[in-house]
Amino acid sequence: MNFRLLLLPFSFVYGIGVFVRNKFFDFGILNENRFSIPVIGIGNITTGGTGKTPHVEYLVRLFSPDKNVATLSRGYGRKTNGFLYASESTTAEMVGDEPLQLKYKFKEITVAVCEKRTDGIEKILKDNPQTSVVLLDDAFQHRAVKAGLSILLLDYSTIFKTDFLLPAGNLREPILAQERADIIVVSKCPQALSDNERNKIIESIAPDKNQNVFFSSVVYATEIRAVFGGETRELSTNLNTILVTGIANASAIKTYVETKTKLVKHFEFSDHHQFSDADTKNIAEIFSTIAAENKIILTTEKDAMRLKDIQVMKELPLYYLPVEVKFHEKDKNNFDKLILYYVGKN
């Protein structure tokens, strides 16, 4: 039995609250703030796991080096409040793991966190007037800012599944909320997707005539990178690996690591897990029991941001597996043109 179904009455109350709040924005009772520069929102209607940050990274690469890009999120999991810039001297506890990941990867862009997105954008533009585009990470429900272009991510694996609103299910909003999106991206698709399956998915989504639907996949690298030192090495089947994940859904990365290396142990934690001393001590102890010399600890880029400041992990061969988003061949050019046209005309 799914015990979360016992929470359905609370989901009903939650749904009423979401409905009323959205209507307040729709009727202008609550204000949606607009900005003169291009603002792109990237989000979802579920609780994590759709690949928001890799899609933000895709957009950063699309704009670089021609545009002065800024990203803004609330900084989920941080232990600070208010507005902060991410830098190489900040920690995941200060700004959150995903903003820190963005800053480490793209040192030239502005990365900021702020619970109040309007205040955050105003601060960014005041401090960095040369900013030419703002990317709002995980902002689909944050309607106080009216993004000029709204991108909604839907996970391929859940397209045909029925779900409930929080807390009984994983939906932040009813499915009908997708009407607010300008672009819908079906993320984490197989790299080979038939026309027939694409059409079935689009039919299931039932987009409005003004909405564009695209398909993307997450692609894992064949090389891993050391968290300390930055050197790279190839994955191989004779490499003994302990996998450490604190993400929403680790099944895909686990399968990939199993096919590329000898997976000895998988430590699977919840999304944005704050690693304790007991956690890392346990990881280190299991690692020490592996008799083979060719052994590593492998994690995700996001988890590396939380593990890199823990002393025990600094003494171990800790690597992360880079990932990238790739749009399907039929979609990439059209998606890129649509994004660049929006930014170019503003």
Image (cartoon, rainbow, N blue to C red):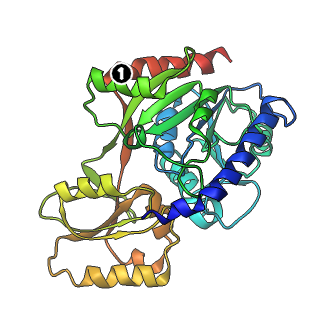
Q: Residue at x 46, y 79 (%)?
A: 311
Rate crowding at label 1 as few (under 14), some (14 to 19) or many (20 or more) other CA atoms within 10 Å: few
Left or right of 159, for residue 265: left
Is 235 on the left-hand or right-hand side of 211? left
Q: Tell me which residue sits at (54%, 47%) in the image.
A: 46
- Closer-to-camera residue (298/31): 31
Residue at x 74% of width, y 37% of height:
22
Instruction: Provide residue 19's location: percent of width, then percent of height.
Output: 72, 41
Choose between 295 and 167: the one closer to the eye: 167
- Which residue type carries mark 1? Asn
Q: Is residue 111 above or below residue 197?
A: below
Give the percent coordinates (x, y) of residue 130.
71, 31
Would you say residue 248 is visible in this rendering? yes
Q: List x then y, in percent, for residue 4.
A: 52, 62
Q: Quadrant of the N terminus?
A: bottom left
- Residue at image position (16%, 76%) is 293
User: Which residue is denoted by mark 1 in the rendering?
Assistant: 199
**Helix, strand, or loop for circle 1?**
helix
Figure quadrant of the C terminus: top right
Q: Nearer the viewer, residue 329 or 19?
A: 19
